[in-house]
Image (tube, grey):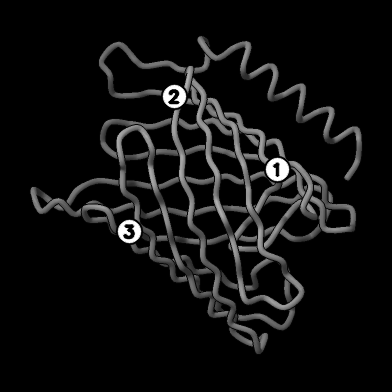
Amino acid sequence: MKLKTISTLCFAASTMLVASSAMAWESEDGAWSTSANVALSTEYVWRGVTQTDSEPAISGGLDVSHSSGFYLGTWASNVDYGDDATIEIDYYAGFGGDFGDSGVSYDVGGLYYDFPDEDYDAFEVYGFVSYSFLSAGVSYSVDLFDADDQDDNVYYQLDASHDIGSVSLAAGVAYWDLDGTGEDPTNWYIGASTELAGFGFDLTYHDTDVDDSDESVVFTISKSM
């Protein structure tokens, strides 16, 4: 992990916090709005596997949304894979809404993973449906992260959440069908989060059956703007 990269991310996080009042915006008719977020975590875990070699992560994002349900945004974090990759930048766009008065909501879109210093770029399309405290989703990609031995890749996930007072509990399990690799990993998590003095606090346990991957307990402090 390069010091220059961490310094740049720290500066970006500090700038976002200072400018928080300017980041949130809404058009006069209320149709368009923007929001931003910044977070400091003990590590960055994605689909059960650490992306920062069990070291701290600084991340931040910016979103633009429309009252119709359309949204787009970007999110970035430091990473450490033991090679030249130091930053992951994600770009996404989608559309969400409700199926009438059924209480069922949906979210569909696309997500592009960009790694400026390595050839790991990938694109996924995703779809989620939610009802009450449950959410189910599927993500699909081809040749994920430039892996020559992979073809179609499908990630299935089921998540649940429940609020007890000011504390939100969350848990989930997912199965990744990695075609052509001979491995189809499963990962799961359970965690709790709350807000205090305008900041978000989250403690989540992650684990996976991926070989050579350790379980993780991740603590995150975040700020939404």
Say which residue appears at 62% left-offset and 33% top-offset: 39
Of the pair 59 and 29, the residue shown nearer to us: 59
In the displayed structure image, the side of residue 61 where residue 125 appears, left or right:
left
Which residue is depicted at the point 72% across and 83% down?
A: 149
Callout 2 amino acid? Thr
Alpha carbon separation for disc pair 1 and 2: 27 Å
Q: Quadrant of the image for the N terminus?
A: top right
Residue type at tag 3: Ser
In this picture, residue 150 sits left or right of residue 188: right
In this figure, which residue is indicated by the disc labeled 2?
Answer: 34
Q: Amino acid at mark 1?
A: Thr
Per the image, the residue denoted by label 1 is 42
Of the numbered discs 1 and 2, the one sitting upstream in the chain is 2
The furthest residue to the front: 165
The residue that appears at 71% across and 57% down in the rendered structure is 50
Residue to which mark 3 is pinned: 135
Q: Please state which of residues 69 and 181 is positioned toward the viewer in this rendering.
A: 181
